[in-house]
Amino acid sequence: VVVGCMDEEAYDFNLAANTSGTCCYIGGCMDATAFNYNPSACFDDGSCEPVVTGCTDPSMFNYNSGANTDDGLCEPFMYGCTDDTMYNYDINANTDFNGQLCTPFAYGCTDPTAFNYDSGANAESDPSTCIDVVEGCLDETACNYNEEANTSNGTCEYEETYYDCDNNCIN
């Protein structure tokens, strides 16, 4: 006597069976640690998939297309400069489009009240290159020429004809 499944449609059909036994009609993964474990399966069909944890949200920066179990650690895209040698480096950024969001350092005077203010500068040199504005007469032939001045204030004074700058007659 051979007891077994005698239904040819069942997973566990036994050609040698001559006495009817129980039959299995549900195939699937029988490994309880697998991602696709089927507790109702009575026949292991070889379809078990391992659990792969990761971010399963395709709209996130760290999306893992191979993950089948979300680990709860999805990170959103944070746009900004990721190059720590650039002026606008952002420690929180994770996406910069191959450096397109980065701005290099442009050293110069960043004080808009300085004589040599550089509107293209984004970083102050160390030590500072800024020069204070010194107003005065810039014409070397004027009586009140100021060699320390770097900005004209329109106050140049000139000697009168036949007189020097001290108003002494030179004739």
Image: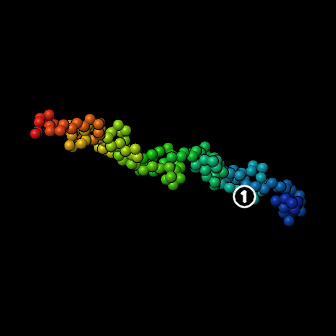
Residue located at (47% from left, 50% from top): 102
The quarter of the picture where the N terminus appears is bottom right
Residue located at (82% from left, 59% from top): 11
Residue 64 visible in the current orientation: yes
Query: In this image, 45 relative to 102: left or right?
Result: right
Residue 166: quadrant of the picture: top left
Residue 1 visible in the current orientation: no
Looking at the image, is 139 positioned above or below residue 7? above
Disc 1 marks a residue whose amino acid type is Ser
Q: Which residue is mark 1?
A: 47
Name the residue at the bottom extreme. 16
Q: Position of residue 95 (x, y in %)?
A: 53, 49
Looking at the image, is 13 positioned above or below residue 158? below
Residue 139: quadrant of the picture: top left
Query: In this image, 126 relative to 70: left or right?
Result: left
Looking at the image, is 58 positioned above or below residue 153? below
Q: Position of residue 36 (x, y in %)?
A: 71, 52
Residue located at (14% from left, 37% from top): 163
Looking at the image, is 99 positioned above or below residue 113? below
Query: In this image, 120 relative to 158: left or right?
Result: right
Label 1 sits on a secondary structure element that is loop
Task: Compare residues 80 and 170 and report the one nearer the observer.
Answer: 170
Query: In this image, 90 relative to 109: left or right?
Result: right
